[in-house]
């Protein structure tokens, strides 16, 4: 996906071709900073992760945000959400979102001061 | 809420809002690692009698590039900075960006103070904690924070500060002021 004929022509493979033209999946509502982690489970039910999904699985061995996954892959956010939704539906990734506690915020303030 | 295990990874989102050209990107660049992100823009002439797009709704979008900033506080604790798109045609992205956000920095330019009204209205309505940071451009007249507060008709508890977003130390102070304010709002909501 990083190979462009030229800027005008756009990418050789249109991004949505990677997801069968779909723009909707259970990954739709994924927040930009939701954290994605591979479960390590084996694909089941005849689901075969595509090359991009394999890249995602390799990337999220430690918790990685949706924004970072999209940035690393260089794919549009919407496409990444569809890919993630499929992986989640098949139990290959878990997606979590911890809320900010008082303790975390204090840690952030101290961390920013130390920058 | 305070008893989450310390090894649970946490990612926090801070929004940087304000009018076009007010220094949002400069602020993010002064304090964080910049990462590119491609996202979709919904074309404005969507759905004019051509809704036979079963399964190919992607036709009505095109990709746009935006950057975000990342500050790693420690392993497992990362703060993300997202600039809210300035132009009106990107307003659809605001709800998504502000969902679950820790808070927002509204950058203001005293030469064009009205540019930040939409951002302030938006965060007031959504109840997102926000501060106003006045970026002091070299050729702009200086005002004090109370002048700005009254010109923007801000609640007394909304922090207002002057800054120079090109300077890392100043950008740091802006973010710390916001997180301190968010902490205050959080603590108040729990008591």
Image (spheres, rainbow, N blue to C red):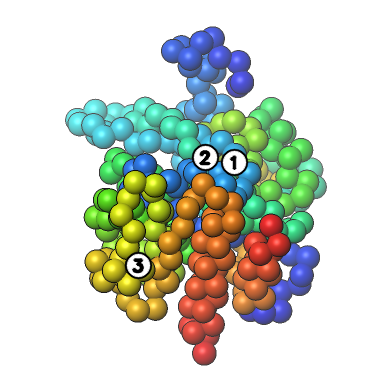
Disc marking residue B86? none
**Reading the chain from its start, which is encountered first: label 3 or label 2?**
2
Residue B74 vs residue B173: left or right? right
Q: Residues within 10 Å of mark 2 (few under 14, many from 20)?
A: some
Q: Residue A2: where, in percent of width, then height?
A: 61, 21
Residue A83, quarter of picture: top right
Q: Which residue is mark 3?
A: B144
Disc 2: which chain? Answer: B
Q: Residue A95: where, in percent of width, then height?
A: 64, 54
Residue A90 seen: yes
Disc 3: which chain? Answer: B
So how many labels did they put on this image?
3
Q: Residue B92: where, in percent of width, then height?
A: 34, 47
Asked whether the residues under marks 2 and 1 belong to the same chain, the reply is yes
Judged from the image, the secondary structure of the residue bearing numbered disc 1 is strand
What residue lies at 39% left-to-right and 47% top-to-bottom? B138
Q: Residues within 10 Å of mark 1 (few under 14, many from 20)?
A: some
What residue lies at 43% left-to-right and 46% top-to-bottom? B23
Q: Which residue is mark 1?
A: B34
Q: Residue B37: where, in percent of width, then height?
A: 54, 37
Q: Which residue is mark 2?
A: B67
Furthest residue toward left: B49
**Reading the chain from its start, which is encountered first: label 1 or label 3?**
1
Residue A52 vs residue B55: left or right? right
**In the rendered structure, are the residues bearing label 2 and label 1 in contact, judged by CB atoms less than 8 Å apart?**
yes
Asked whether the residues under marks 3 and 2 belong to the same chain, the reply is yes
Residue A98 vs residue A28: left or right? right
């Amino acid at each position: 996906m990083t190979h462009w004929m030229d800027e005008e022509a756009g990418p050789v493979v249109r991004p949505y071709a990677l997801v069968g033209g779909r723009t909707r999946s259970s990954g739709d509502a994924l927040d930009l900073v939701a954290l994605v982690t591979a479960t390590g489970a084996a694909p089941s039910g005849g689901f075969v992760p595509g090359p991009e999904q394999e890249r995602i699985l390799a990337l999220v061995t430690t918790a990685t945000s949706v924004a970072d996954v999209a940035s690393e892959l260089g794919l549009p956010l919407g496409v990444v959400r569809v890919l993630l939704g499929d992986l989640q539906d098949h139990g290959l990734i878990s997606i979590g979102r911890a809320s900010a506690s008082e303790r975390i915020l204090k840690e952030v303030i101290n961390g920013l001061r130390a920058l | 809420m305070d008893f989450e295990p310390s090894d649970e990874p946490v990612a926090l989102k801070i929004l940087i809002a304000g009018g076009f050209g007010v220094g949002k990107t400069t602020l993010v660049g002064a304090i964080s690692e910049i990462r590119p992100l491609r996202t979709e823009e919904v074309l404005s002439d969507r759905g004019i009698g051509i809704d036979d797009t079963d399964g190919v709704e992607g036709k009505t979008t095109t990709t746009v590039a935006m950057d975000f900033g990342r500050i790693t506080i420690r392993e497992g604790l990362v703060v993300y900075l997202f600039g809210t798109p300035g132009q009106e045609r990107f307003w659809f992205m605001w709800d998504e960006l502000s969902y679950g956000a820790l808070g927002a920095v509204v950058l203001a330019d005293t030469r064009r103070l009205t540019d930040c009204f939409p951002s302030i209205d938006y965060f007031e309505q959504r109840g997102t904690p926000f501060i106003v940071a006045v970026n002091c451009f070299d050729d702009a007249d200086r005002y004090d924070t109370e002048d700005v507060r009254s010109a923007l008709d801000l609640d007394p508890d909304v922090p207002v500060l002057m800054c120079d977003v090109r300077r890392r130390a100043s950008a740091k102070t802006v973010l710390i002021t916001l997180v301190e304010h968010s902490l205050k709002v959080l603590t108040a909501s729990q008591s």
